[in-house]
Amino acid sequence: MAIETPIQPRGQFYAAPLFTQPVMPWIPDYGSLEDSGQSIHVGGDVYVYRAPEYGLNVTSLYAITRAGVIVLDTQLLPKYAEEVVRDIRARTDQPIRFVSNSHHHPDHMFGNEVFRREGAELVSSYLTARLIDGHGFWYLMLFNGLWGGHLPQTYVVPRTTYSRFREIELGGTCVQLMEFGDGATAGGESVDLTVAWFPEQRVLHVSDLLLSQMHPVTADGTSTEDWLVQLDQLRTLVRELQPRVIVPGHGNPGDVGLIDAQERYLNTLRRLVLEHCDGGEAPLTDDRRAQLRAAIVSEFPRHRLFLALDMTLSFIQMVGPQAFLFQRSEAPAPPRIPTFL
Ligand SMILES: [Zn+2]
């Protein structure tokens, strides 16, 4: 029996599918909620927490000082932000004083609320704060189709901001925050990015300039060509600083070999996209997409973060291979090497 509609609709409402149903079917490769992360000691009183696959393998770094704790990046899900806090509490009772967001992507800032509750002061570049402000709501809407109720109820914009450079000194430990991408220069994985340098410990946190054995997302208004420009700039910075440890935004810490690996990954990915899209001219059909995915996985059999790979493939399908391959702006500002040192 048909149910009568009490009011006849006048017109129709179309809900955007992204917001009403899962963006992609969840597959076992994306991990499960029961998985937990691990922490790694990288020297001095500096530690790196690495979330599991379900939390996108994102890293949070924390430095314990005599006067409190400094944290870089706050995770995607509150569940893992709370794991970072527990990890810190297992080592010290010092208050968490400063939390810095390297860029505005949700996997690096959705946990901000957890740290604000701990009493931390949230710090980021002015551009990152503005982008969190402008994108946080939409990221929550989009990711609702992936993580649903595991997402935070709110997003928090850092109130303490800087442009280009900020030094934080706490309990005898110093960290220098250097804005690497500023919206007017070549962007890599994101249009905004801050790297963090601990001069005494010689630890360099480069966030998503590098991913260690992880597939990247390349969908944020930049291109792989932009990213390769940034990697050249990072090489210059690394030659200058001579870090002992480089901490990527996803995956295990390493050394300068991480830059070589990232370059190799991006160049291989570019070659495969060219091959599967007739030199970048043809759109990525569903069939070609499946073949391209298989080719990428067979080139990088140890790489994780398959959700990022699938998002990148969706991006290439939506806007075409040109946006993936070539610099997006017709008249880009000349790339600059950071000049903070
Ligand atoms: Zn990330």
Image (cartoon, grey):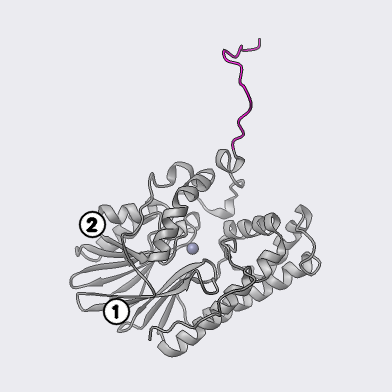
- Mark 1 or 2: the one toward you: 2
Amino acid type at mark 1: Gly
Magenta stretch in the rendered image:
1-15
Rendering quarter of residue 11: top right
Image position, residue 297 (x, y; %): 67, 65
The answer to whether residue 42 is magenta is: no
Residue projecting furthest to the front: 331
- Helix, strand or loop at label 1? It is loop
The answer to whether residue 3 is magenta is: yes
Specify few, some or many for label 1: CA neighbours under 10 Å numbering under 14, 14-19, or 20 or more. few
Q: Is residue 300 left or right of residue 102?
A: right
Residue 328 visible: yes
Image position, residue 237 (x, y; %): 46, 85
What is the C-alpha distance between the residues marked 1 and 2?
Answer: 24 Å
Specify few, some or many for label 2: CA neighbours under 10 Å numbering under 14, 14-19, or 20 or more. some
The label on residue 119 is: 2
Rendering quarter of residue 66: bottom left
Give above or below for 5 relative to 174: above
